[in-house]
Image: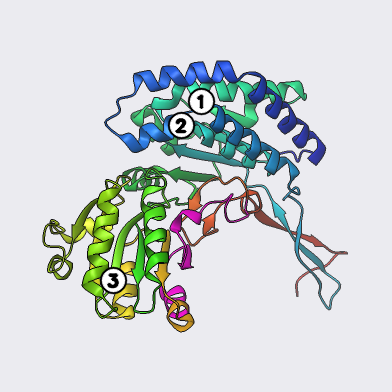
């Protein structure tokens, strides 16, 4: 794609900020239609669907943050001149056309588009049908912002395809796709991987773990668990699984204390056989597959392990590779845990809810990648680029 000047891109973003603020009533009215048409059976998805003035303020903030960031295109990654005089520079470059598939959250229509556009990419937005009215209004705002600055609307497009049409689109795209980001559950990811003809960057499930070792500060531990589990159950960075080291001081008392705290906050509990010896009223985890589930609900599993190594093995076996926390005052234990646990973000004494572009200083994010190529963790502006080598010669030939 033709490279756009930074000032032009920022002018489009400034127009978008004005349009979002000036047309709140139109957006809220469209979102109301989406909410009225949606069944509340899936509370997590319903929560993600809601747009209010606070959410619009957040959209505006995301655009402002990206506008203030340096242009990520054309930055020198490396430069060397070889002995024969060949001059080689490696620079950041746009991907080209990015397709993102997501559900429910209209704010993704802002965050994904602003990041892709500032990084000089074209983006195809395949939002869920549950947010169709909201997304149409938001993409209409984008088109107005582009047109106001002399650009056509092809940079940001909304795809309204059903499952079968999406499958056909992936198999036989009408234009070249350079990157697809499926932002959702296992079924969506497998669907895209099966049918896509280009690179796929996985934004996978959460299913995040927290391990309590023998040195943990108990009051801090309860506070972190409660925040990670209940602050926002619809988020991929919410906590689902809690592991206790069997020989921690006051093991039984702490288990019962946590049980009471979780119950007070309407969190249902499943336990393994060892934990049930203490928490006798809680149901057993029915099978190992539950350890793999991302709940997106006021629900958690509590298990007991013998050693730190056992905790690490269990997390690496069952987690989604998103986030994991160790509660400990031992720097050695924390270091071992953080080095050996295979997740995009690993924590000592902190809530998994911080795995977020804004909270981690990245700014607006396209997704949280659990892939290892091309980037892991929050996909911000500086991560939405690839690279290109520029080689300058003077009649050089290879001998």
In front here: 60 or 258? 258
Work out how far the residue at label 1 is from the one at label 3, CA to CA, in angstroms. Answer: 43 Å
Q: What element carries label 3?
A: strand
In front here: 64 or 189? 64
Which residue is identified by label 3? 244
Residue 298 as seen in the image, left or right of residue 28: left
Q: Is residue 339 magenta?
A: yes
Residue 357 lies, in percent from the top left, at 57, 51
Q: What range of the chain is rendered magenta?
A: 335-362
Work out how far the residue at label 1 is from the one at label 2, CA to CA, in angstroms. Answer: 7 Å
Which residue is identified by label 1? 135
Please identify the residue farthest to the bottom as the structure is shown.
Answer: 332
Total marks drawn?
3
Q: Nearer the viewer, mark 3 or mark 2?
A: 3
- The answer to whether residue 101 shows anywhere in this view is yes
Q: Is mark 2 on a helix, strand or loop?
A: loop
Residue occupying image coordinates x 37% and y 31%: 46
Q: How is the image coloured?
A: rainbow
Q: Residues within 10 Å of mark 3 (few under 14, many from 20)?
A: many
Residue 300 lies, in percent from the top left, at 27, 54
Which residue is identified by label 2? 127
Judge whether 21 appears above or below 333 on screen: above
């Amino acid at each position: 794609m033709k490279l756009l000047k930074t000032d032009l891109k920022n002018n489009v973003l400034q127009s978008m900020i004005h349009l979002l603020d000036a047309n709140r009533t139109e957006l809220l009215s469209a979102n109301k239609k989406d909410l009225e048409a949606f069944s509340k059976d899936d509370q997590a998805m319903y929560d993600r669907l809601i747009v209010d003035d606070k959410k619009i303020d957040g959209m505006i903030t995301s655009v402002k943050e990206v506008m203030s960031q340096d242009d990520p295109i054309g930055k020198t990654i490396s430069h060397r001149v070889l002995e024969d005089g060949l001059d080689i520079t490696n620079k950041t470059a746009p991907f080209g056309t990015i397709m993102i598939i997501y559900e429910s959250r209209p704010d993704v229509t802002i965050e994904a588009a602003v990041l892709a556009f500032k990084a000089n990419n074209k983006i195809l937005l395949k939002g869920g049908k549950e947010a169709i009215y909201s997304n149409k209004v938001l993409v209409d705002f984008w088109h107005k912002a582009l047109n106001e600055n002399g650009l056509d609307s092809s940079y940001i497009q909304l795809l309204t395809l059903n499952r079968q049409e999406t499958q056909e689109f992936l198999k036989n795209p009408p234009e070249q796709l350079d990157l697809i980001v499926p932002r959702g559950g296992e079924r969506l990811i497998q669907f895209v991987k099966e049918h896509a003809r280009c690179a796929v960057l996985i934004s996978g499930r959460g299913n995040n773990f927290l391990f309590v070792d023998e040195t943990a500060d108990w009051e801090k531990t309860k506070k972190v668990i409660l925040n990670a589990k209940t602050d926002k159950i619809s988020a991929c960075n919410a906590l689902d699984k809690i592991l206790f080291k069997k020989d921690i001081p006051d093991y039984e008392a702490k288990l019962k204390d946590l049980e009471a705290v979780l119950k007070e906050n309407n969190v249902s509990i499943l336990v393994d056989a060892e934990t049930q010896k203490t928490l006798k009223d809680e149901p057993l985890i029915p099978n190992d597959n539950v350890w793999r589930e991302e709940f997106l609900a006021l629900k958690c599993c509590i298990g007991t392990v013998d050693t730190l190594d056992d905790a690490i093995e269990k997390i690496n076996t069952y987690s989604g590779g998103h986030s994991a926390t160790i509660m400990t005052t031992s720097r050695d234990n924390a270091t071992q845990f953080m080095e050996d646990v295979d997740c995009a973000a690993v924590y000592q004494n902190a809530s998994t809810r911080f795995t977020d572009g804004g909270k981690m200083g990245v700014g607006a994010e396209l997704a949280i990648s659990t892939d290892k190529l091309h980037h892991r963790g929050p996909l911000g502006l500086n991560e939405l680029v690839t690279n290109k080598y520029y080689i300058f010669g003077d009649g050089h030939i290879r001998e």
